[in-house]
Amino acid sequence: MSAEQWLADYQRELAGAVDGAARANARLREVGGHAVAPRGEVEAWVGVSGALERLRLTARARALEPDVLADLIVATAQAAQRAAAGRITEIMTDFVGPSAALDLVKAHLPADVAHTGGRRPRRSAADEDDYFENPEVRGE
């Protein structure tokens, strides 16, 4: 291979990397997470950083004790964060593949994302008392 051919190949490779980085960046800017409490009392949306951007409480939330509602809000926001983190992991896996760079990204995300893809494992059906002690939130 001539020096000119090697340089042309290298420039194409660099252009492809720049294009891939731009596409990954655009996809990452659109990332967000959303989660809803099991009975719909709380709904939360987070941005790419995991920061809470929107919170919706329904009339059913008024029936909850303050501490239970507070725990449900936190659990719902965390589920939304896991959903966003799972999406970030998908995008970065597409961009860099299994690599040290992906490991670095995952190291800064919630611990359970690497094992569950951003979703909390489902529990079996719980009775009414257990629901208020251990509310399960679903992320989207």
Image (tube, grey):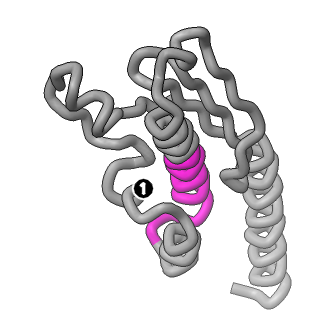
Q: Position of residue 52 (x, y in %)?
A: 71, 44
Q: Residues within 10 Å of mark 1 (few under 14, many from 20)?
A: many
Q: Is residue 16 depicted above or below 83 in this figure?
A: below
Q: Residue furthest front?
A: 65
Can you say which quadrant of the picture contains the N terminus?
bottom right
Q: Taken as a whole, is the magenta stretch helix, strand or loop?
A: helix
The magenta segment = 80-98
- What residue do we see at 74% from left, 69% from top? 13
User: Is residue 59 rendered to the left or right of residue 114?
Assistant: right
- Which SS class for mark 1? helix
- The foreground one among 87 and 80 is 80
Residue denoted by label 1: 113
Q: 6 or 47, which is in the foreground?
A: 47
Residue at the top extreme, as displayed:
59
Q: Residue furthest bottom?
A: 3
Q: Quadrant of residue 45?
A: top right
Residue 11: x and y in percent read: 83, 74
Q: Is residue 13 above or below residue 132?
A: below
Left/right placement of residue 89 relative to residue 128 reads right
Q: Nearer the viewer, residue 31 or 23?
A: 31
Res 100 visible: yes
Q: State the residue at coordinates (51%, 25%).
A: 36
- Residue 62 x, y percent position in the rendering: 56, 17
**Kind of residue at disc 1:** Val
Q: Which of the 4 image quarters holds residue 135?
A: top left
Q: Which residue corresponds to the image point at 72% horizontal and 55% vertical from the top-left?
A: 49
Residue in the foreground of this view, choosing between 12 and 134: 134
Q: From the top left corner, tell me how far across and down residue 138 is, in percent.
A: 42, 30
- Residue 79 visible to the viewer: no
For residue 84: magenta?
A: yes
Image point 48% across, 75% down: which residue? 103
Residue 39 on the magenta segment = no
